[in-house]
């Protein structure tokens, strides 16, 4: 995963606020008060996951002040974490492949499962994910796909695959955006060419780069956030994006439709982890347990328009959401999708071609 939002200046402080009529109960997940800085919890996360009602509820139930600092990419998060030694953050939301990197760099606490309540609420595939077997270091928060959001009023023919962009670049000229992310963009083109999203073949990467140079003159921008307002304003008619963002934007304008390309795309999971430098591990465990509650998971899914990995929470969702294939795509399509995986030193090959593409 990738850049999604610009940084928000400063921190959002939410302290001991009441939430009238809220039925959420924290019960046994209240933080202990015998170690660390238990009066506040610093969270480092994606902007769109900072839900004020959620933070207020947690603060009300625990008495802890919750402070949120948003980041715009996994890479910037990792760089800041390493540069600052972790700072005050006790909970971070890295994407699946970044969990692997952080484990390799010895940055994460190995979770004590006896302190977690509700792991059995997760779907089986999220109880033993490939990126973190047996959830040793991370707990899934949400998941989704990468695809195309298009204006069905302008584009009468729905995009079916990535090659639609090349076949219709005259119509899409300067009215489409691709994500500002090397692995997503290169991966999508690799998938279109019949290769893996995680190819480690230099010739295959070169072919993907060459295809992108053909398309680049028609691309308005490589962007992961600003496209949303531009789509709503009608300035853009197609954007490569994450399913969670597509669902939120299409709620504002139902003429905007989301599709997963039939050749496949990326399948991603954003997670919750505790850095080794965390000053309030008790608070971090309390937060994770809070999120694992089925009622909380269902409410987050509805309000933030994200797919929950919590099976018990999923069962509480309205049928219209459970049956929404943008939230929960069919298994046959998911089978064609791949998780982005760390590539070690070979990532330098991707970066080299990406720099040539975006700087030319």
Image (tube, rainbow, N blue to C red):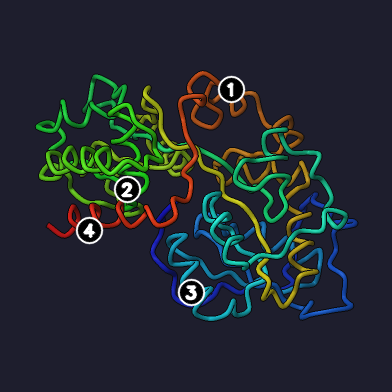
> Which of the two discs, 3 and 4, sits closer to the camera?
4
x 39%, y 38%: residue: 197
User: Real-space Cα distance between discs 3 and 4?
Assistant: 22 Å
| Percent of width and height locating residue 165 | 21, 31
Mark sitting on residue 80: 3
Q: Earlier in the sequence, mark 4 or mark 1?
A: 1
Q: Earlier in the sequence, mark 3 or mark 1?
A: 3
x 84%, y 79%: residue: 35
User: Real-space Cα distance between discs 2 and 1?
Assistant: 27 Å
Q: How packed is label 2: few (under 14 Cα within 10 Å), some, or many (20 or more)? A: many
Mark sitting on residue 355: 4
Mark sitting on residue 323: 1
> Which of the two discs, 3 and 1, sits closer to the camera?
3
Q: Earlier in the sequence, mark 3 or mark 4?
A: 3
Q: Earlier in the sequence, mark 2 or mark 1?
A: 2
User: Real-space Cα distance between discs 4 and 1?
Assistant: 41 Å
């Amino acid at each position: 995963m990738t850049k999604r939002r610009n940084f928000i200046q400063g921190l959002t402080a939410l302290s001991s606020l009441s939430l009238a009529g809220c039925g959420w109960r924290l019960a046994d997940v209240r933080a202990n008060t015998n170690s660390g800085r238990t009066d506040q919890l610093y969270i480092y996360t994606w902007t769109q996951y900072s839900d004020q009602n959620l933070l207020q509820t947690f603060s009300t139930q625990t008495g802890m002040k919750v402070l949120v600092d948003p980041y715009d990419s996994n890479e910037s998060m990792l760089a800041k974490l390493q540069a600052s030694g972790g700072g005050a953050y006790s909970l971070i939301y890295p994407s699946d492949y970044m969990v692997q990197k952080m484990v390799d760099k010895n940055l994460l606490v190995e979770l004590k499962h006896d302190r977690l309540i509700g792991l059995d609420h997760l779907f089986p595939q999220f109880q033993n994910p490939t990126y973190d077997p047996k959830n040793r270091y991370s707990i899934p928060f949400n998941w989704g796909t990468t695809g195309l959001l298009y204006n069905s009023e302008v584009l009468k023919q729905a995009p079916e695959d990535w090659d639609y962009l090349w076949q219709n670049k005259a119509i899409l000229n300067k009215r489409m955006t691709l994500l500002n992310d090397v692995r997503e963009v290169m991966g999508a083109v690799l998938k279109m060419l019949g290769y893996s999203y995680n190819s480690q073949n230099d010739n295959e990467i070169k072919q993907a780069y060459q295809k992108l140079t053909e398309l680049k003159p028609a691309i308005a921008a490589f962007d992961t956030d600003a496209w949303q307002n531009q789509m709503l304003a009608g300035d853009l008619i197609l954007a490569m994006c994450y399913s969670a963002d597509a669902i939120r934007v299409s709620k504002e304008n139902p003429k905007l439709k989301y599709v997963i390309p039939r050749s496949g795309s990326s399948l991603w999971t954003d997670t919750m982890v505790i850095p080794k430098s965390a000053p309030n591990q008790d608070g971090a465990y309390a937060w994770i347990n809070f999120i694992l509650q089925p009622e909380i998971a269902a409410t987050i899914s509805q309000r933030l328009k994200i797919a929950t990995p919590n099976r018990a929470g999923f069962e509480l969702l309205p049928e219209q959401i459970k049956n929404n294939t943008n939230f929960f795509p069919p298994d046959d399509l998911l089978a064609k999708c791949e998780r982005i995986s760390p590539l070690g030193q070979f990532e330098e090959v991707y970066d080299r071609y990406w720099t040539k593409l975006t700087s030319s």
